[in-house]
Amino acid sequence: MTEATGCMVAIDGPAGAGKSTIARAVAEHCGYTYVDTGAMYRAVALHAMRAGLDPAADAETIAETAARLHFEFRAVGDGQHLFVDGEDVERAVRAPEVGNLSSPVSAIPSVREHLVAAQRRMAERVPVVMEGRDIGTVVFPHALLKVFLTASAEERARRRYEQLSVAGQAADLAQILADQRARDLRDMTREVAPLRKADDAVEIDTDPLTIEQVVERVVGLLDARLEDRDGPAV
């Protein structure tokens, strides 16, 4: 399958590094479409959970489910939600148990094959900002700009704890940190498309930076790449 040409910015990094927040803000600033690939894997995990499927025992059935699902990102109010087969699953896919299940689900090769195809289709006609764990290495290895966001495990756990607390969901910081570290290990050691920084990606440590500072840096990098590609704006 050939790579689509619409991916302007590929943002990768571990869970909790701020990928979704930054990608969404960059896309809004540039007028691009934001594609949250992690939410897509979470949606497959959600459907697997609802059907009582186990990634270790039911990989083929989960892959068949992934192939059938129709994904669409729609504007809802001032934000963007993921709809799967017409259902708004934005809130459901953010549940911690769905997030934990999405890691083994995303490690199923045929699941990744189906979702990568769906992600590339999304970028066939419009420029996108896409975030995940293998965007710059697998999905769009020729993206105009690749960014790898990092943050300490402790900081990422703190952010997740605050996110859940604000949403009114029960949360335990120590458990979140333990889950975070376990997920990092799974993501970095899986056989298919492991989490890693692309050789030509720009790494940004978000620990000491505000959201605005990170967005400003990514937009500046993109402007520089566009100028190199197209020449200075007239």
Image (cartoon, rainbow, N blue to C red):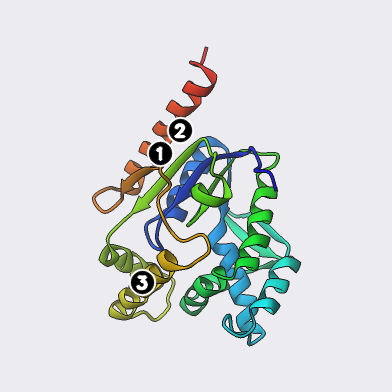
Q: Are marks 2 and 1 in contact (CB under 8 Å)?
A: yes
Does residue 42 appear anywhere in the picture? yes
Instruction: Tell me residue 88's x, y (percent).
Output: 65, 67
Which residue in the structure is indicated by mark 2?
Answer: 222
Kind of residue sitting beneath label 1? Val
Which residue in the structure is indicated by mark 3?
Answer: 180
Closer to us: 116 or 154: 116
> Label 3 to label 2, Cα distance in Å?
30 Å
Kind of residue sitting beneath label 3? Gln
Residue drawn at x 50%, y 66% as measured from the top left = 191
Query: Up-down: is 228 above or below 44?
Result: above
Query: Up-down: is 37 above or below 106?
Result: above
Instruction: Tell me residue 177's x, y (percent).
Output: 31, 74
Residue drawn at x 60%, y 59% as measured from the top left = 81
Residue reaching furthest to the bottom: 52
> Label 1 to label 3, Cα distance in Å?
25 Å
Which residue in the structure is indicated by mark 1?
Answer: 218
Query: Up-down: is 101 above or below 83?
Result: below
